[in-house]
């Protein structure tokens, strides 16, 4: 049975994936998971320094990787990203739209987000997905093959106080994925969404700092302790989710094993939400 196991693990051998926001956090976890399963990976991010470390890590593991400086809020930039992937690797099989921002999660002391806050959040979390998908669409349609996985959030499954811009943008991300799934299904392209729960990344560190400064009960805690407290309160399985957990879910949805799954949103959240 061992060879069967190896075949399943190496289901991206010879394939190429682009991971936006792959320089750190969840994007890094997704990129490493796909690479471990044989994929070449282009890291598309604004943060060159962090991205170079991930590229080196992937190459050390034996597959190819490179960096493309990409701002997903700009259509010309995601067009460039796709061109670079094709130039460097000759094909593009998987697009993971992971780049995201926390929005005005009360990071500022304003109670009501401004129009600029809304715009900045939607620019990355929604238009980032739209731009990158539009950039890759004609190539994947012509080829009759492609896997697109978008990273939303459980916040997109229902609003929470203080998270209006973020939650709304992630709900839009789930919805826009379903629209693309319908549009691209006749061309053999699967589009799915993963909704992560609570993962300790630089994004969550900022949320923890905000929760500490606004909630008396968190006053004496470190940001990491605030996070752990939130996990204990919210997660039925009783543990935080990891970047690897999200990477494995993305790898499944991006593989041919999930060929009959499209237009779905999968929560990777230890049971916080059941829909
Ligand atoms: N951390 C969590 O608990 C959590 C939970 C649910 C959903 N998510 C989502 O997962 C994704 C990754 O989150 P994370 O926690 O790893 O965040 P993070 O802030 O640690 O990493 C985000 C990455 O995206 C990149 N990025 C930001 N704006 C960009 C842009 N305009 N163009 C290209 N790259 C850009 C950043 O440079 C960074 O490398 C986001 O979409 C986030 O909303 C995170």
Image (spheres, rainbow, N blue to C red):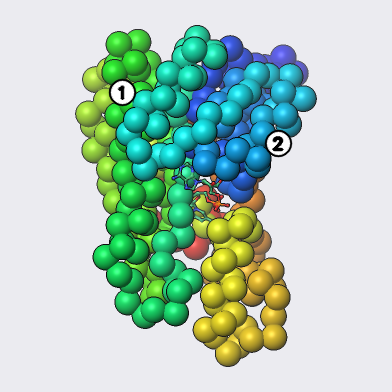
Residue 213 picture location, percent across and down: 57, 82
The front one of 57 and 184 is 57
Residue 206 picture location, percent across and down: 57, 66
Count of numbered tags: 2
Would you place residue 54 above or below residue 169 in this image? above
Q: Which mark is residue 200?
A: none
Residue pictured at 45% horizontal, 49% vertical: 100
Residue on which disc 2 sits: 53
Residue 231 picture location, percent across and down: 61, 68
Would you place residue 210 above or below residue 149 in this image? below
Badge 1: residue crowd in 10 Å (few <14, some 14–19, many ≥20)? some
Is residue 29 shown to the viewer in this render?
Answer: no
The front one of 136 and 170 is 136
Q: Quadrant of the C terminus?
A: bottom left
Badge 2: residue crowd in 10 Å (few <14, some 14–19, many ≥20)? some
Residue pictured at 28% horizontal, 47% vertical: 175
Residue on which disc 1 sits: 137
Q: Secondary structure at mark 1?
A: helix
């Amino acid at each position: 049975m061992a060879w069967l196991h190896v075949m399943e693990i190496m289901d991206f051998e010879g394939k190429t994936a682009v991971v936006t926001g792959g320089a750190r956090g969840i994007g890094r976890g997704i990129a490493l998971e796909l690479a471990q399963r044989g994929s070449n990976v282009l890291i598309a991010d604004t943060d060159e320094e962090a991205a170079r470390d991930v590229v080196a890590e992937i190459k050390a593991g034996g597959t190819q990787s490179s960096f493309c400086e990409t701002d997903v809020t700009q259509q010309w930039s995601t067009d460039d990203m796709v061109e670079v992937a094709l130039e460097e690797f000759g094909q593009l099989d998987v697009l993971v739209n992971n780049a995201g921002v926390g929005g005005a999660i009360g990071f500022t002391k304003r109670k009501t987000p401004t129009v600029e806050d809304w715009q900045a959040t939607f620019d990355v979390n929604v238009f980032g997905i739209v731009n990158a998908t539009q950039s890759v669409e004609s190539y994947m349609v012509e080829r009759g093959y492609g896997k697109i996985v978008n990273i939303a959030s459980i916040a997109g499954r229902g609003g929470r106080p203080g998270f209006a811009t973020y939650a709304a943008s992630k709900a839009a991300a789930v919805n826009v994925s379903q629209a693309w799934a319908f549009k691209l299904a006749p061309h053999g392209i699967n589009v799915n969404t993963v909704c992560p729960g609570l993962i300790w990344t630089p994004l969550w560190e900022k949320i923890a700092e905000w929760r500490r400064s606004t909630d008396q009960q968190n006053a004496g805690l470190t940001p990491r302790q605030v996070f752990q407290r939130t996990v204990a309160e919210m997660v039925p399985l009783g543990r935080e989710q990891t970047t690897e957990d999200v990477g494995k879910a993305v790898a499944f949805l991006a593989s041919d094993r999930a060929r009959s799954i499209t237009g779905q949103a999968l929560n990777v959240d230890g049971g916080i939400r059941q829909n």
